[in-house]
């Protein structure tokens, strides 16, 4: 990050809208000389499941990230607000160096390109997850109620609705019977009642291996770098832990999940977070919160494929299905959901569901 050596000229960036390209180039060229930006060095960094794109650019102060977020589709104000909250708590979130709010361009500090997903292995996993759990406890201690939206019944319900709308109807291509629809509604009611009864904290909402960056040696104060936090809400305390330990992209053995969850619970309790004094009850809340998330993710991944043409997410559906089915078979009252998931897997005839 501190190197001032410019990279070789990159390949041209593909633009589908000439007006957007012109605006981008004008904005980049207008940045103050103090930033030392080399416009010719712009190259693709990454994209995500939204309309945002990210580029890397060389500057006199080392590489920086440029966010391209078309205002018609993306509101950058939550990103700026939450970045300030995280950085104010000593967490390693990108610094907003320059921002053209009207046109949706932003110059950010660069957290590198080593995601947890690419960095984790058998040698460093315990240390890296330890860093992530420590950062999570610190994040949850931020008094952000009122600064972010409430993760209320309306939002949770709207998320779960992605499951029947996009996974069942569009991806599997089937209709629910009346009994299945009623059974699903009862199960969703139980799940949301549990979720909404949990103590509330600041929730990142996508705290997992693709949004955590290894930015230093395991155990260092800089680790992890935290990305993609613009959708943060005030909601259930177990949500981000479920995102991390039941990640759609990395499968941990359940005994490992429990070990990390206990470590988090002990650390959170010492920090004064409202995790309760019964780990068994906390674990149940964790599982039920994860179930809500995984039903949502099944719908989101299906939507990303069928609406947005991002088919690679379909490769992760079997693991998410297994997470959801595992919890649905474990607790009283969720049997109709377990049977529905089994029927849908049989209908889909996709390898890897069982």
Image (spheres, rainbow, N blue to C red):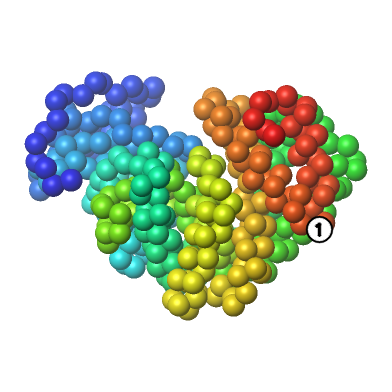
Please determine whether, in this image, residue 353 is positioned above or below residue 194: above
Q: Taking the image as drawn, is residue 63 in sight?
A: yes
- Residue that badge 1 annotates: 332
In this rendered view, identify the residue nearer to me: 263 or 89: 263
Q: Position of residue 50 (x, y in %)?
A: 47, 38
Residue at (42%, 70%) from the top-left corner?
Answer: 142
Q: Quadrant of residue 141?
A: bottom left
208 relative position to 151: left or right: left
Name the residue located 37 percent from the left edge and 53 percent from the top edge: 128
- Residue at the spot 67% in from the left edge and 63% down from the top edge: 284
In the picture as drawn, the residue positioned furthest to the right comes out as 179
Return the residue nearer the eye: 14 or 180: 180
In this rendering, the answer to whether 17 lies above or below 339 is: above
The local secondary structure at tag 1 comes to loop
Q: Give how far across and how far down residue 164 sits, in percent.
A: 74, 39
Q: Quadrant of the N terminus?
A: top left
Query: Which residue is more in the foreground, 102 or 221?
Result: 221
For the point 19% across and 41% down, which residue is it? 63
- Tell me if residue 316 comes above or below residue 141 in the rendering: above
In percent of width and height, residue 259 lies at 52, 60
- Estimate the x, y position of residue 53 in percent, counting from the top left: 37, 35
């Amino acid at each position: 990050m501190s190197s001032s050596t410019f990279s070789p000229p990159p390949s041209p960036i593909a633009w589908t809208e000439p007006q957007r390209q012109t605006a981008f180039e004008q904005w980049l060229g207008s940045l103050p000389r103090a930033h030392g930006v080399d416009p010719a060095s712009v190259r693709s960094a990454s994209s995500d499941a939204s309309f945002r794109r990210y580029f890397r650019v060389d500057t006199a102060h080392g590489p920086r990230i440029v966010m391209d977020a078309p205002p018609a589709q993306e509101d950058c104000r939550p990103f700026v607000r939450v970045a300030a909250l995280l950085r104010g708590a000593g967490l390693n979130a990108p610094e907003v160096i320059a921002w053209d709010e009207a046109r949706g361009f932003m110059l950010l500090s660069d957290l590198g390109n080593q995601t947890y997903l690419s960095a984790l292995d058998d040698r460093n996993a315990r240390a890296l997850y330890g860093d992530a759990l420590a950062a999570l406890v610190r994040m949850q201690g931020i008094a952000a109620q009122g600064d972010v939206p409430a993760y209320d019944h309306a939002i949770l319900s709207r998320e779960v609705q992605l499951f029947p709308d996009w996974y069942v109807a569009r991806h599997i291509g089937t209709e629910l019977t009346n009994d299945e629809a009623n059974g699903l509604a009862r199960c969703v009611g139980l799940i949301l009642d549990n979720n909404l009864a949990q103590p509330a904290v600041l929730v990142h909402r996508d705290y997992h291996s693709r949004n955590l960056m290894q930015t230093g040696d395991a155990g260092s104060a800089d680790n992890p770098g935290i990305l993609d936090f613009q959708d943060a809400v005030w909601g259930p305390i177990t949500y981000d832990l479920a995102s991390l330990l039941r990640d759609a992209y990395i499968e941990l053995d359940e005994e490992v999940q429990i070990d990390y969850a206990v470590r988090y619970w002990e650390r959170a309790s010492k920090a004064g977070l409202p995790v309760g004094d019964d780990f068994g009850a906390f674990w149940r809340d964790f599982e039920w919160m994860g179930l809500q998330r995984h039903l949502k993710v099944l719908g989101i991944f299906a939507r990303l494929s069928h609406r947005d043409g991002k088919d690679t997410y379909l490769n992760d559906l079997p693991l998410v299905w297994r997470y959801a089915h595992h919890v649905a078979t474990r607790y009283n009252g969720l049997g109709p959901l377990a049977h529905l998931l089994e029927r849908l897997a049989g209908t889909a005839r996709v390898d890897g569901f069982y």
